Every structure is written in C-alpha cells, then in structure tokens.
Image: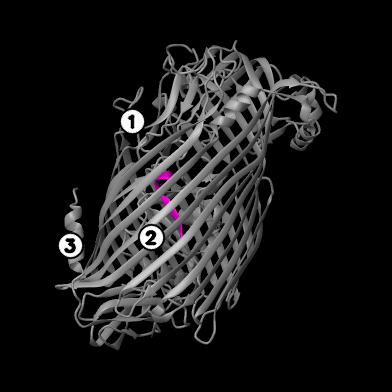
Amino acid sequence: MHFSLRRLAAGLLLAAAPLGAQGVVTGSVTDPNGRPLSGVLVTVEGTAIRAASQNGTYRAVNVPTGARSLTFRYIGFQAVTKTVTVTAGATATLDVKMAAAMTTLSAIEVKGQVAGQASALNQQRTASTISSVIDNELVGRLPDPNMAEALARVPGVAVLRDQGEGRFVQIRGTNADLNSMSLNGLRISSPEQNSRQLPMDIVPSDQAAQIQISKTLTPDMDADAIGGNVNIVTRTARANQPLLNATFAGGANQLGGGALVNVGANAGKRFGASQKFGAMVGGTYYKNERASQNIEGDWCSQTRNCGIAPSLTSLDAPNLFELRDYPQVNRLRAGLNGTLDYLLANNSKLFVRSTFNRFSDDEVRARARFRFRGGGGSRWTQVTPDSGITTGSQFDRDIRLREVIQDILTAQVGGEHFAKDGKSLDWAVGTSRASESRPDVLTMSFRQSGMTLGYNFADANRPRANVSVGAFDDPSRFGFNSLVREVRDTKDSDISAKLNASMPVSFGGVTGTLKGGLSARLKERDNSLVNATYTNALGANASGATAATLMSALTAETTGRTIFGGDYQFGRTFDPTRMADFIKANPTAFTANALTSATTSAGGTFAVGEDVYAGYLMATLDAGALRLIPGVRVEATRVENTAKIVSLNAAGTALSRPIADTTGTSNYVNVFPSINATYRIDEYTNVKAAVTTALVRPQFQDMTPYVNVQAGQQTATIGNPALKATTALAYDLMVERYFRSVGFMSAGAFYKDLKNFIFPTARARRTDEALGPDATQVLQPVNGPTAKLYGFEVAWQQNLTFLPGMLAGLGLNANYTYTKSVAEIPGRGRTGVDTPLPGQTGNAGNLGVFFDRGPVSLRVGANYSGEFLSTINAITPDGDTRTRERLQWDASGSYQIRTGIKLFVEAINLSNTPLRATVGDRLNRGGGGDDPSYEFYKPWGMVGMRIER
C-alpha cells in the first residue's frame, strides 16, 4: 500500500479550518461511590462529537454554542443524559455521577472485581486502536505475581517462562524482541545482557492501575513495536476517594518446600479544600524460594558432524545428556512507586512519577553430564535411532553458584495543559535506567575420562543414560577439571523528552483534532564481562587436597540424591558451601588460562550508543459513526557501537595481536504512515480496522562489530554493524460486541509483512581471517529477505446473570489466537523449507470459569501456549529448537469477612505442567540451555489477606 505524504499533510492542514461558534465541555465522571471512571463514552447529541474519560475526567471540543445535551455511556450502568450551556471560546463544566446499575446485573454488584472488569471493557471499547486493557482489580482474579503472568490471560498474548514463572511477552505470534514495553508512556530500559526484550517478571503486578496492550499503533506512539506495545499505567490519587490497600500472604513450594512471602501496600489521597494536590505511594515485596529439576541434551546436528554411521542422521547421535538439579532458586521482587500531581485550571495538571523495581535470582545448580563425544578417543560402538553405546567418553559433575540482580529505575516529570478554546499541550521529560549485575559467578567442574556410556531415548518423557564402564558418583574417581569465575555488568540508560500539541478542527460535517509532536530518546548501554578461567592444575592449598582428591574433600553426601520424584538417580555431588569456602581460602591454588580468560571477556564486552529523534502529525476525525485517525511519523536513528576484536595466531595458542576496540556507526531515517478507523454500529458494537507500519532495531550485541574466537572451538562469532532494522506493514480488522452484563465478544484478523528479518547464519571461514587453526566456520546475524505473519483471535467474556438462583453468579472468560508465519531464510539445507518466525506460537488461549456471589469469589483458569520455534540453528534446520505446547491450570478463591477485608487462597500450576523443548521434529530429541528437554516444578500456592479501603 502506498501513501502520499504530501497529500496526507495537505489534508491534515486543510482540516485546521477556522472554527465557528464553538466551545469546550469538560468535567468529571464517577460511580455512585465517587470513584473516578475511565472509558466513559461521552457524545454530544445532534453532532458527531465524542470523547472518552481518563481517570475520571473528560474533555469534548468543537461543541456548538447554546444548550447542548451530552450523553454518558458506561457498560454496567444506565446511560445518563445532561444539558449544559456552551459559550463560544469558553469551557463549560459538567460533572456526572453514574447512579443506576443495569437491571441485568441484579445478581451481582458493580463493585470490586466486576468494577475492574467494567473499567477494562469500557476503556477497550473507547480506545482509538485495536487494544486490550487489564484493570488493577482484574490482576488479582487469578494468581499472577508479575506482569508477564497477568498478560498471559489477554487475547493474543503468550509468555515465555523461566523456572516456571512468566518472563517475556509475545504479542500475536511475534517474539518478545519484536514488542515494546512502556511505563506511563515512557519507554523502559532493559537489563538483559544482549537483547532489547524487557523481562516482565521484574515488575510486580500490584504496581499497575491499568495495563494497556496496543496491537495497532498511532503516530504519537514510538514506532518500534511490530507485535504491539504494552503500557503499564501506575496509580494516581483519586478525587474524593482516598485509597489504602494492602496484601499479606504466605505459602510454600511443593518442590523443595521453600517459602512464599507476598507483602504490598498502596496509599493515595488528594489534599486541600479543592483537592488540587495528590500523592500516591506504593511498595511490594515478593519472595519465592523455589526449586526445579530438568534434563537437557545437545545433538550432533547442533554443533558438528559426529562421524556416525552414514545411514543415520546426525540427530541420532547425542553430544551430551545432562541431569540438572536446582535445589535453590531464591527469587525476590521488590518495588516502590510514587506519583505527585497538582491540578491547574481547566483540568490541566503537573506531575512527577517515579518507580524502582528489583529482581534478584540466587541459584545453586548441580549437573551430572554424560559427555558422549567428550575426549579425543570417543567412538560410537553401537548406534540405533534411539539408543547407543560410546567408548572413550567423559562424565562431568559441576556446581554453579550464581546471583543475578536486575534493577529498573524510572523518573518522569511532565504536564498537561488545556486552553479554553480547545487547544492542548502536553510534555514530559524522563529517564529510565536498568542494570544487571552478576557479582561473582562460580562454576567448579570435575571430570572422569575413558568411560563407556550408554543411552536410550525411546521414551520421550524419560530419556535415559547410564555408565557401563566407570563410576557414576564415586568422588574419588573424578579429578578437578576447571574453575570459572565471572563478573558481568549491564547498564542501560535512556533519557527521553516529548512535546505534543493539539487543536480542534472542523470542516464540512467532520469534527476532531489535529495533533503534532516531537520527541527524542538518547540511549547509552554498556556491557562488561570479566572472565577468569582456570586450568585443571591444582596447587598448594590449606586443605592439602590434590586434583584427584579435591572432590572427595568437598563432598558431604553419603548417598546419592534423586530427581523427578525418584525417576532419576542423580548421585552424590559435592557441597556448594564447601566449594565456595575452599575457593575463598585458597585463591592462589588455581592456575589461570590467560588466553581463554581474555578472549571470553572480550566476547561479552561492548557499548552501544543509540539516539532516536522523531516527529509526527496526525488527526482524529469524527464523521457520524466513523472515526478516522490518519497520520505519519518520522524517526531518525543514529547509532555508534564499540566492541572487541579477537585474533588468534595460526597455532591457536596465543593472540596474533592485542585485543582492540573497534567501532561501527549507522544512521538511517524511517517514515511510518498509518491509519486507524473505528465504526460504531451502535452503542455496544464497534468495527475497528488499521493499516500501520513499524520497525524493530537490531539486538544490541548483534549490531556491534565484535569478532570473537575461542581456542579449540570450531566456530567463531562476529557481529554485523551493517544490519538493517526489521520493518513491517500490518493490516488489522476487529469486530467487538459488548454486553450490558459487563462482558464482550470479539473476533479479529491480522496480517504482517516483514522485511529485513534478522536471523543467524553460518559461512565458511575465509583464509584472511585470523581465527586460529580450529575455527572452520563463522556465525553471524544477517538480514533475511521477507517474512509473513498472519492469524486471527477470538474472545468471549460474560457474566451469566441470566441463569437462575445461585448460578447467576457464574461467568466465563475464553480466548483463542491462531498465528502462522513463513520466513525466507537462505542457508544450508533451508532451500524449499518453510521456517516460521522464532517465538511464533501457532495456538494460544485461555479458559476461565469464575463465580461471584455475596462474599464469595472463586476462579479456575487454564492457560495454553502452543509449540513454537525458539532457536534457529545457523548450521542446519535439523538443529532448530522448538518449545513444546504447554497447558497450565491455576485457581484462586476469596471470602470477604467484612467490608474491605478479604481472605484469599491461590494455587499455581495445579496441573504440574513441565516446560519442554526438542531439537528438530522428534519428541525424544530434547533441547538444552534456555530450551530444556524437560523442566519440572510441581505446584505452589499461598494464603493471605487483602485490605481495600
């Protein structure tokens, strides 16, 4: 589709024709208890003028002078019509209280969770884009401790999980790095080491007043959101309604028996006779002492040809099979937020907002590793498609102690200013700072060589490996192999500013506003890695241990442990506390591998400077039942990156030249035309459509000019500063039908055409590259030609108030999303192969049954996420990793013991659903790393009290 920018701009300027005798009507809209309402649809009778309330206030412009009737419509309440006298060039005030509930709601009251449901649906109905909204009252309906878990319930949204908890958000089949996250409209910096993805589990769900998911964009929004944008709106003090709520809860994890603690509170009030000054503060503390167990695999197709029988594929031969035990996964989420605002004349205001969130993950990981291909003399003496025996192999046991601390700090100051003639101006200046610290990661490994190992993977749910010759867990048979210490630091800082101005416009029978603005976002990002890798030599130490006796000295277990409910023997392993104490007491006992330490450190050290400057022009035009929002946005991007170049000599034993900095730059400009349309068939039915454009910039490390190679490794990795941003043209259509009983049905379809999709590829090493004697191929991210993504989503939510008696308290919530994608990815073995986009979940959905009657509230919910491609293998499609389908059941219930006080119980993962991933299309070929073959958690839950005043 082609847009003429000149015609669009001319049309928008023509819209700014001189206005006749018109004025402005503004005021507040509240429920019977004085609670401000968002999403109230305000229409001026006899005209096409409409407006929607935000935080309890509305503003209608272009209103003809004289006595005018305004109608206020809010799902859950009867419509209210009132008359006001409008004066030319002036602002009239009309406050409204929605008093009478719909008669169909006789079984339930429009308060509490039903009020939250109504608020979300009204905001969704009046939104100018195709979007979904979650109100803070709804977040607690099911046990959703973080934002990712809450978003998983939304139509078109799926989540990626880590250690059983939601972490990254996928919108309409797009991977998490194709979406954007904002806090009160301010882009949030990411603490992740290499990517732009924001881990949503760092933000406690109690911090939000609303969560807005925009699936189409308007020109006043940042354009880097191909899938969509998630905007978290924090709480603001309410007029006439002081707020105080608190949560106190505790529980336990079934696996490991660790504690759960959840404490949080929010308080807000407006002060003074005129209540112009408002203050809101809140804090949360959530501790989850978890445990998990998993198995992982690595296959010849993922890394190299293993020299197996030519009649079999490389996927038939495992490189590695691991048993993993995480006896300690201590997670802590703590957050603080505050908002101060001061009301000026004409509902104008000034505000200051700030949030701080911390997520820490303190893990102990023990591994038992069957290294089938380990050792230069390893051979497959028998291989069938699902079983085999290898000789000359190795078996490792290691323990890793790792603490990860992620912080996000945001601060924003701004204002909203409204003139009596309908013009408006808003501005904001803010900063977002994110960091990740891994202060001292310790990994100690012991190895046994010359072993005969067997494996049988016929059972996809319980693959097996065994030791035929050698010892499975005798500490005296394992020699010290290595010690690795790492310190990682990531700092991501954004400074942003924006200025928007709008004015009323009218021509012919069309009324609306013309809006334009400028913005800038300046990013500085630094990643540093300090690695110290030590050889298998062990020197003098206070314990008198040798390399052969150290594991025995560190082992306290006399009998081996089991995992997966006793299905697997994990065996004895050494004690993590003894390990840490030995390292601390004997720092000089270890011999550093200077080359590996230097090259590994260089591979994780880089800096990114990225500045984005933007301007836009758009209009909101109402003509009868039709609203159009045409416009265009222009973004200019300036990038300067610094990374390290590593070069090895021909023997691979030393650097051929000192590790040096290298710099890459990139400058580009993108134009984003768009149009959103809403046709209001009646008060409860909308048809929405949009044609929009967007982009996603390359991942941070991918676009740096680094060159990294490790001695003994067959592959080298390099960055690509010439990467182009991925762009998309999207078409969207949605039909929404809302119910008077606070519910809705919707159905929609979408299609996205992507260009310059980024994927990893492998090429043969060139002779002029100083990559040592071992590297034969180079891995590098590149742009692909095109990719297509399309699908549909349906949703149904309804309170079944038409049922008799107690059954009238029942309700249903269901949604389903189907997506499909095809990407053109050049490379070995991919000719004629349809490759989906990574993260594209083919099927996703939710089913919830709820009951609200009197003081009792009950919820049961199921969340389903279908299979998706999680990792593209740069060498062969046989090595692509797929995360398998997952269905999880959760439940919650509450009982109101008195007004404003509830006792509640929550249970998570009642279905004991594991996380699974496989390599290729075979279910019994398990994945590894971030995509484990089989990860196991068991259910967990808590009980507590909520106070809401």
User: What's the residue type where badge 2 is placed?
Assistant: Ser
Q: State the separation of the CA atoms marked 1 and 2.
A: 33 Å
**Residue pictured at 20% horizontal, 73% vertical:** 506
Label 1 crowd bin: few (<14), some (14–19), many (20+), radius 10 Å? many
Q: At which x and y percent is residue 225?
A: 37, 50
User: What's the residue type where badge 3 is placed?
Assistant: Gly
- In the picture of the structure, the residue carrying the numbered disc 3 is 11
Give the answer, above or below, for where 304 lies relative to 498.
above
- In the picture of the structure, the residue carrying the numbered disc 2 is 132
Label 2 crowd bin: few (<14), some (14–19), many (20+), radius 10 Å? many
Q: At which x and y percent is residue 83?
A: 29, 88
Q: What element carries label 2?
A: strand
User: What's the residue type where badge 1 is placed?
Assistant: Ile
**Residue pictured at 20% horizontal, 64% vertical:** 13
Q: At which x and y percent is residue 394?
A: 64, 18
- On the question of residue 74 being in view, the answer is yes
Q: What element carries label 1?
A: loop
**Mark 3 or mark 1: which comes first in sequence?**
3
Q: What stretch is highlighted in magenta?
A: 174-183
Q: Which one is in front in this view, the residue at disc 2 or the one at disc 3?
A: 3
Q: At which x and y percent is residue 324?
A: 63, 34
Q: State the separation of the CA atoms marked 2 and 3.
A: 31 Å
**Mark 2 or mark 3: which comes first in sequence?**
3
Q: In this view, does 127 lie to the left or right of 68?
A: right
Check residue 825 in the rendering and tell me which mark sits there, or answer none. Answer: 1
